[in-house]
């Protein structure tokens, strides 16, 4: 395309430009690296960023600051090459056989295959395989912590694997991704006897949930479609809260109208206020998420509104980058287990897809085992798994504190089953009391997690207690949203105001008279209880 440009600087062609990395669990590949690869994105590199001073006593040369009258998009455009793009992607029917010839351009507005099945974004793997795993590792590592457009984003730093043909000028990004992967030292040791437990906190993001990773991709493509004069006036979604927050924020950044269908009285105030604040047209509908999903699918088939739910496979391209980030943050070592909360079930497939691409392209030599964790009040995948994958039945989702996964008829059921079967995966569930207790226990060790992460931690506890997950297994729990979105559930728990729940780990405030003696008595007792036992 006319806007294509070079992605890589020739200095990246040799691994000698990068420090040697000590990695476990993958093989080194010794294929000769090419001198360059050209793609439609602007280069993140120039000679000033890769050249060091010949005089060790002299300060390293600094890259010239961009002109005062240009922004980072302008700067990226100025460094752009006219080299031909060699990478591409297209829609194909999900899990189609090798004889299938059905495919669609990403510039088409299509959500289902001819047979009514799901679509998937398929990349030209042969073109990607022209460059070995070491090349991709070094490229992705070189972009971390930068503000170069658009590579400051954890999603767009993997642009070649996401939307390789989109013009950087069309990208809508808040530099999402690059989320914290932290060692849950005390929780692992105290409650599980584990010393290698990690939490990938995807809730530390622009709108407070992992949905930003997918929405930057979808809204960027919509931005491109509108510039191509496709019939798209706005973007719509059904939501249990987090999807609407992400959609409304990214549409607001791009100046694109957003329409949100929310189930009335079933999401937190913090989740509700986000799309309102970002200017979305919000419809509060007297039904559950599944009812909202049915309506939005009907509406988008009649009106020029682009569907933003995970039925749209574009979002999964962004969400898969969280899996690549995990490998990157472990210095390209593969964890043993990754546990993901599941509702509409797109995310478990997205993680599988990210790990699998890294394996197929030589960045690692295996993938982790995946666990999908569901709330017992909305557990169709769990029931399907327990039946030995014999028959799937949608369920009527009951109210759960993990409201974002309160889904009884998940759109991505086929994707989730595929991911789990191909990763030797497991499905677990958590009751309301189990997930709330797990949330309280995690918070007591310094976290501040959402109920959905409580579901994932409950799954971990059960698998650890049964011996399936070992004490030394490197395990990653994916935290999908920020706990600040769900403060009311925490207030109710610590106030012991949840009916039929013991709230065993509640920590209510102590009521004390306003005099010195009363305060001293209370503190002396507290300190006595906390003093080390001899």
Image: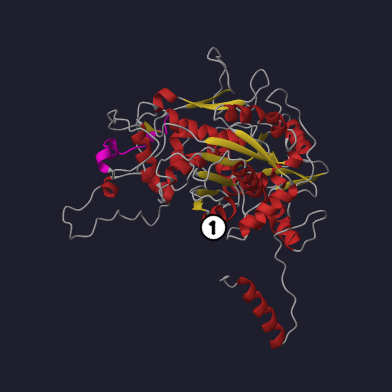
Which residue: 70% across, 55% down? 273
The furthest residue to the bottom: 516
Residue nearest the observer in this picture, 219 or 190: 190
How many numbered marks appear? 1
SS category of the residue bearing label 1: helix
Q: Position of residue 96 (x, y in %)?
A: 58, 18
The furthest residue to the top: 99
Q: Is residue 511 magenta?
A: no
Q: Is residue 505 visible?
A: yes
Q: Position of residue 109 (x, y in %)?
A: 62, 28
Q: Is residue 13 magenta?
A: yes
Which residue: 64% across, 25% down? 118
Mark 1 lies on residue: 186
Q: Residues within 10 Å of mark 1 (few under 14, many from 20)?
A: some
Task: Decide: is 79 above or below 498.
Answer: above
The quadrant the C terminus occupies is: bottom right
The magenta segment: 1-17
- Left or right: 151, with 249 as reference point: left
């Amino acid at each position: 395309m006319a806007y294509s440009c070079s992605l890589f600087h020739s200095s990246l062609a040799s691994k000698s430009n990068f420090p040697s990395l000590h990695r476990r669990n993958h093989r080194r590949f010794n294929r000769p690296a090419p001198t360059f690869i050209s793609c439609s994105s602007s280069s993140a590199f120039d000679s000033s960023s890769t050249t060091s001073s010949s005089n060790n006593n002299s300060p390293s040369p600094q890259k010239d600051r961009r002109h005062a009258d240009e922004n980072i998009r302008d700067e990226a455009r100025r460094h752009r090459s006219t080299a031909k793009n060699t990478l591409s992607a297209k829609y194909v029917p999900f899990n189609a056989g090798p004889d299938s010839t059905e495919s669609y351009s990403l510039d088409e507005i299509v959500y289902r295959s001819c047979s009514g099945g799901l679509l998937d974004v398929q990349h030209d793997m042969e073109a990607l395989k022209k460059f070995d795993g070491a090349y991709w590792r070094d490229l992705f590592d070189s972009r971390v912590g930068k503000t170069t457009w658009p590579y400051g984003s954890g999603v767009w730093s993997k642009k070649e694997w996401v939307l390789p043909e989109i013009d950087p000028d069309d990208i809508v990004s808040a530099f999402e991704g690059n989320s914290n992967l932290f060692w849950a030292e005390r929780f692992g040791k105290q409650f599980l006897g584990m010393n290698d437990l990690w939490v990938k906190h995807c809730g530390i993001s622009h709108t407070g949930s992992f949905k930003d990773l997918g929405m930057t991709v979808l809204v960027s493509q919509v931005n491109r479609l509108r510039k191509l004069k496709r019939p798209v006036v706005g973007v719509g979604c059904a939501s249990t809260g987090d999807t609407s927050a992400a959609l409304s924020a990214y549409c607001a950044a791009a100046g694109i109208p957003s329409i949100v269908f929310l189930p009335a009285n079933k999401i937190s105030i913090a989740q509700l206020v986000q799309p309102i604040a970002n200017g979305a047209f919000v419809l509060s509908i007297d039904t559950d998420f599944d009812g909202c999903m049915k309506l939005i699918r009907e509406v988008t088939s009649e009106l020029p509104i682009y569907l933003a739910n995970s039925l749209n496979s574009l979002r999964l391209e962004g969400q898969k980058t969280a899996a690549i980030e995990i490998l990157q943050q472990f210095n390209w070592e593969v964890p043993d287990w990754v546990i993901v909360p599941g509702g509409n079930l797109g995310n478990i497939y997205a993680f599988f897809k990210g790990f699998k691409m890294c394996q197929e392209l030589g960045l690692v030599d295996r993938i982790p085992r995946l666990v999908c964790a569901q709330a017992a009040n909305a557990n169709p995948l769990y029931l399907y798994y327990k039946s030995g994958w014999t028959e799937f039945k949608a369920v009527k989702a009951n109210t759960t504190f993990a409201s974002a996964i309160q889904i009884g008829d998940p759109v991505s059921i086929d994707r989730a089953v595929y991911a789990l079967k191909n990763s030797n995966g497991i499905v677990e569930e958590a009751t309301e009391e189990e997930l709330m207790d797990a949330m309280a226990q995690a918070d007591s060790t310094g976290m501040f997690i959402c109920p959905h992460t409580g579901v994932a931690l409950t799954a971990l506890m059960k698998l650890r207690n049964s011996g399936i997950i070992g004490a030394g297994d490197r395990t990653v729990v994916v935290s999908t949203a920020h706990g600040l979105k769900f403060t009311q559930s925490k207030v109710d728990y610590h106030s012991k105001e949840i009916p039929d729940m013991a709230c065993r780990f509640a920590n209510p405030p102590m009521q004390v008279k306003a005099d010195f003696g009363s305060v001293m008595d209370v503190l002396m007792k507290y300190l006595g209880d906390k003093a080390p036992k001899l």
